[in-house]
């Protein structure tokens, strides 16, 4: 009889442990997914921010070429126009992958910008990959 009670107590303890473990694992994975998404958003903000590598590459292009790039791929490919190619000093980004946001979508670029008419608009489409939604990460 005594061993039966211990056995029931052990089963209850094991069940409580399993439930608690499942809660901890579920909460932990939810938190790490959120942390991961927060990190991706942070990376996108850093990349397109005023001191970010993509913004700096655009500024360097403007400095060398005397005009804003028409497209972001202009930062990677030497211009076909010989006059422009003479001003081209180096790829302003070493890899075209530098133009993709942390979700694998191309950063969006518009020049002149609708929000920054004297310069350019630069934004990540965010996690949903759709421009103009609440998760966009923008330079305005
Ligand atoms: Ca979006």
Image (cartoon, grey):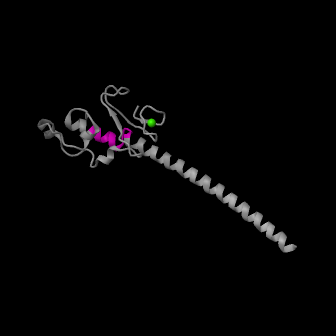
Decide whether the magenta segment is chiefly helix, strand or loop. helix
The answer to whether 1 is drawn above or below residue 60 in the figure is below
Q: Is residue 97 above or below residue 9?
A: above
Q: In this picture, is 41 found above or below 113?
A: below
Magenta residues span 48-59
Looking at the rendering, the quadrant in which ligand 1 lies is top left
- Residue drawn 20% across and 36% down? 65
Q: Which residue is at the front of the view, 93 or 28? A: 28
Q: Where is residue 7, by image quadrant?
A: bottom right
**Residue furthest right in the image:** 1
Q: Is residue 53 magenta?
A: yes
* Quarter assignment of residue 15: bottom right
Q: Is residue 64 left or right of residue 109?
A: left
In this view, the residue in front, 11 or 81, is 11
Q: Residue at x 57, y 50 (%)?
A: 31
| Residue 71 image offset from top left, x and y in percent | 27, 36
* Quadrant where the image shows the C terminus: top left
Q: Position of residue 38 (x, y in %)?
A: 50, 45
The image quarter in which residue 137 lies: top left
| 13 drawn magenta | no
* Residue 124, x across and y down, in percent: 40, 38
Quadrant housing the N terminus = bottom right
Q: Is residue 101 left or right of residue 85?
A: right
């Amino acid at each position: 009889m005594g061993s039966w009670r211990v056995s029931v107590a052990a089963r209850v303890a094991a069940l409580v442990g399993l439930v608690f473990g499942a809660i901890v694992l579920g909460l932990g994975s939810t938190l790490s997914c959120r942390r991961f998404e927060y990190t991706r958003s942070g990376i996108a903000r850093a990349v397109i921010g005023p001191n970010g590598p993509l913004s700096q590459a655009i500024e360097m292009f403007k400095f060398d070429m005397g005009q804003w790039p028409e497209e972001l791929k202009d930062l990677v490919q030497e211009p076909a126009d010989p006059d422009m190619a003479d001003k081209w000093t180096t790829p302003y980004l070493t890899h075209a992958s530098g133009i993709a946001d942390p979700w694998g979508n191309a950063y969006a670029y518009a020049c002149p910008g609708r929000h920054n008419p004297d310069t350019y608009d630069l934004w990540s489409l965010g996690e949903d990959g759709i421009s103009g939604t609440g998760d966009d990460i923008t330079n305005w």
